[in-house]
Amino acid sequence: MAVIGIDLGTTNSLGCVYRNGKTELIPNAYGSYLTPSVVSMTEDGKLIVGQPAKDRLITHPERTVSSFKKDMGTGRSWKPGEKSFLPEELSSLVIRSIVEDAQNYLGEEIEEAVISVPAYFHDEQRVVVKRAGALAGIHVERIVNEPSAAALASYFTANEEQNMLVFDFGGGTLDVSVVDCFENVISINAISGNNHLGGTDFDRAMAEYFCFKNGLNYYLLDLPFQQSILRACEQAKIKLSTQSVAEVSLVHLNKNYNCIFDENVLFNTTHSLLESCKNVIGKAVKDSGFSASELDSLILVGGSSKMPVLQHYLSDALNIPVLKEENMDSLVTLGLGKY
Ligand code: ADP
Ligand code: MG
């Protein structure tokens, strides 16, 4: 029976299966590998998970919850509508959705999974993740650290020891780890992070700039207009990882609003965020006891690592070669297949 790997992310979750000597990502019902870690409740009490739930962040913000992974093990509950849920209950819905996608993809029952968690998760939080799996009807065979999985995915069985920095930049969190790889054994030497720094901060900085350019004050706008500006800015940010210019153009109350973004504008509007990223790296390196010259590479992981402005900034600011793997947002998942 197949065991699947699940990267249970704060923003997006992914599933994989190891077959015929390689890791395959599992597509969901919408043809994507990424399932947004979002849950929404309809007026008649039905729970919606993933992309359709994410779409409801704009239309039904008060009935939709996201980023609940941050509260795993804190006992805090979330209310997408009338009923309260613990983060593990919400996470179990995301896990269930991935298990069902895997069953459809593989044509067999799935009863076991390996799930990745941030390196800083303490024992109690790991127990809570196992409980989320149980609530989703699966046995969690193993809990793996996210940076270890990412390092394993990018570490070629080089015969020599390698010290790597894993820079995992997601939607709302940055985790930096110093890992030592030798003969497929990965050990984590230091971790550092910022739980309030991620891709959404770039979206907000862009949204503020968009408003400034159009004579609006972002903080005085109604919530739905703020949300649509944020969504449009996120799309422009994503476009900028494959093209040099992206335009944000919106119509609101019969008025047109426009703004052009390129790497230069993005650099100027997000400079303090980029600097914060560098500082988190500095702290991880310092805590590891290594000097930058003793580190072999920095591996870019997570959706937000796809930003060229960040890649260029880090390449210029650091003395460490920056490794750009092709599948930054699925590197953790690809590594899970190797466990
Ligand atoms: P998490 O680990 O938090 O679950 P991900 O690694 O999936 O999250 O990262 C999600 C973030 O990545 C979002 O903020 C999204 O806007 C951003 N992102 C995804 N693709 C790109 C891209 N091509 N360029 C820039 N940012 C991207
Ligand atoms: Mg992640």
Image: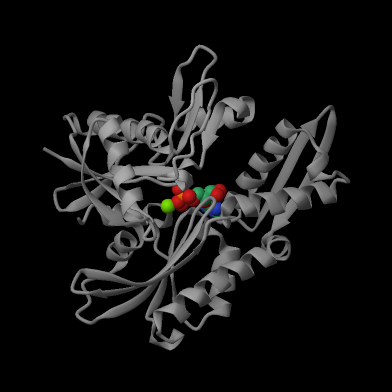
Q: Position of residue 190 (x, y in %)?
A: 39, 73
How many marks on residues? Answer: 0
Q: Position of residue 207 (x, y in %)?
A: 73, 48
* Residue furthest out toward the right: 215
The residue depicted at 61 percent of the width and 44 percent of the height is 235
- Against 79, residue 245 (above or below) is below
Q: Quadrant of residue 88?
A: top left
Q: Position of residue 173 (x, y in %)?
A: 51, 55
Quarter of the picture holding the C terminus: bottom left
The residue nearer to you, when weighing 335 against 78, is 78
Q: Quadrant of residue 43?
A: top right
Q: Is residue 266 left or right of residue 157?
A: right
The residue depicted at 40 percent of the width and 76 percent of the height is 297
In this picture the colour scheme is: one colour
Q: Is residue 218 left or right of residue 120?
A: right
- Against 59, residue 192 (above or below) is below
The residue nearer to you, when weighing 111 against 161, is 111
* Residue furthest out toward the top: 44
- Against 23, residue 255 (above or below) is above
The residue nearer to you, when weighing 8 against 194, is 194
The residue depicted at 73 percent of the width and 65 percent of the height is 268
Q: Is residue 37 left or right of residue 223?
A: left
Quarter of the picture holding the N terminus: top left
The residue depicted at 57 percent of the width and 53 percent of the height is 199
Q: Position of residue 4 (x, y in %)?
A: 22, 43
